[in-house]
Amino acid sequence: MNFNFYLVKSFRILLFPFSLLYGLVIVIRNFLFDKNILKSTRFNMPIINVGNLAVGGTGKSPMVEYLLRLLQNEFKVATLSRGYKRKTKGYVLAHAGTTALEIGDEPMQFHEKFPGVAVAVGEERIVAIPQLLHDKPGTQVIILDDAFQHRSITAGLNIMLTDYNNLFTRDMFLPTGDLRDQRSSYKRADVIVVTKCPQDLSIEERNSLVKEINPLKHQKVFFTTIAYDIPYHIITKEQRSIKAEDEILLVCGIANPKPLKQYLVTHAHTYYEQTYGDHHIFTIDDLKEIRSKLEQLNNHKFIITTEKDATRLAKFRNELIDMPLFVLPVRHQFLFGEGTAFDKVVHTFISRFSANNKSL
């Protein structure tokens, strides 16, 4: 840990009074929803909510993608996100000419990877869902991206993610910690997924973490680790594996690049960083700087970026066609052979919902 880490941590501790104030607001808000003073709407269709209690990267996008792969061949699926840092307002449905500036980088990622899925964004999800159903009347399942703390909608299946390295049970309210909702809100979840676990997580530690989380009787707890696939060129889609002799320039603007850096440490000869803020909008000057940094490296050199960053870099298509810029795909890999059990929870929820509706 470096000096900057301790400086930031010390500064956040000094902000503890603001955390108390923020926490009080959140507790009051949840109380009003619990007492039905603030209303929550339930829609007559299967809605799956993927979210967390903290800010930062817990793997929500890869989980949405996991669900899309699981369901897209059986159902007409749609996703609805807020569209963070987009240049538009209100409800937007992705189409053939849509860009990341219109819907945000994560929804754009869904749109490009799953062309058969309806991808929409809207700050007010309670308003956006009827608009989405109007535009896509055949929709059978909606996946809400990052809506766990937005209680204006009651989803039928709530999947809450928590980072192994920053478990919600050990966290504090913003700005001292990363929590944007109170710890006890985990009780609203149907499924809790501990993400970014070590691949060799032991059964003993697994059981200890389950005990610490203290799930309710109906809640299922799963554990996943990060799995990276073969990098592909951002334009040509040509694949290129990372080899032990490679020198890599890492270009990324994501909330938590630590697992990615650890992956490069173990798979490449060395790597260098060109990092930006979360959801950074790349400029032509950024591209020139990236090219300049690459030229300083030796043999076996190329650039690695994330899928999220790739959606914001793709606008420079002509400049990137001859640049060795490769995208590293990431996905959830369930530990202890429990992926099938997780899939069953999702399928059971949808089938029971459909069966209950037919019986009415």
Image (cartoon, rainbow, N blue to C red):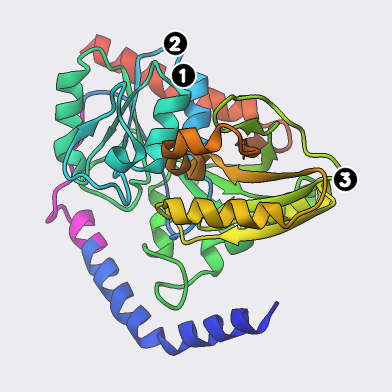
Foreground residue, 153 or 88?
88
**Residue extending furthest right?**
245
Residue 245's disc is 3
Q: Which residue is mark 2?
A: 74
> Residue at point 39% right, 27% down?
111
**Label 1 with label 2: CB-CB less than 8 Å:** yes
**Magenta region, residue range:** 30-43
Residue 262 is situated, as x and y percent measured from the top left of the image, at 74, 55
Quarter of the figure with the N terminus? bottom right
- Whether residue 276 sits left or right of residue 198 in the image: it is left
Q: Is residue 57 visible?
A: no
Q: Bin the neighbour count of mark 1 within 10 Å (Cα to Cα): few under 14, some 14-19, many 20 and up.
A: some
- Among the two numbered marks 3 and 1 on one chain, the one whose residue lies closer to the N terminus: 1
SS type, badge 1 = helix
Secondary structure of the magenta portion, mostly?
loop
**Residue extending furthest bottom?**
14
Q: Which residue is mark 1?
A: 71
Q: Amino acid at mark 1?
A: Leu
Q: CA distance from mark 3 to mark 2?
A: 43 Å
> Residue at point 43% right, 63% down?
183
Q: Amino acid at mark 3?
A: Glu
Any magenta on residue 42? yes
Q: CA distance from mark 3 to mark 1?
A: 39 Å
Q: Mark 3 or 1, which is nearer the eye?
A: 3
- Among the two numbered marks 3 and 2 on one chain, the one whose residue lies closer to the N terminus: 2
SS type, badge 2 = loop
Q: Amino acid at mark 2?
A: Glu
Q: In the figure, 132 relative to 252: above or below?
A: above
Any magenta on residue 286? no
- Picture quadrant of residue 114: top left
**Label 3 with label 1: CB-CB less than 8 Å:** no
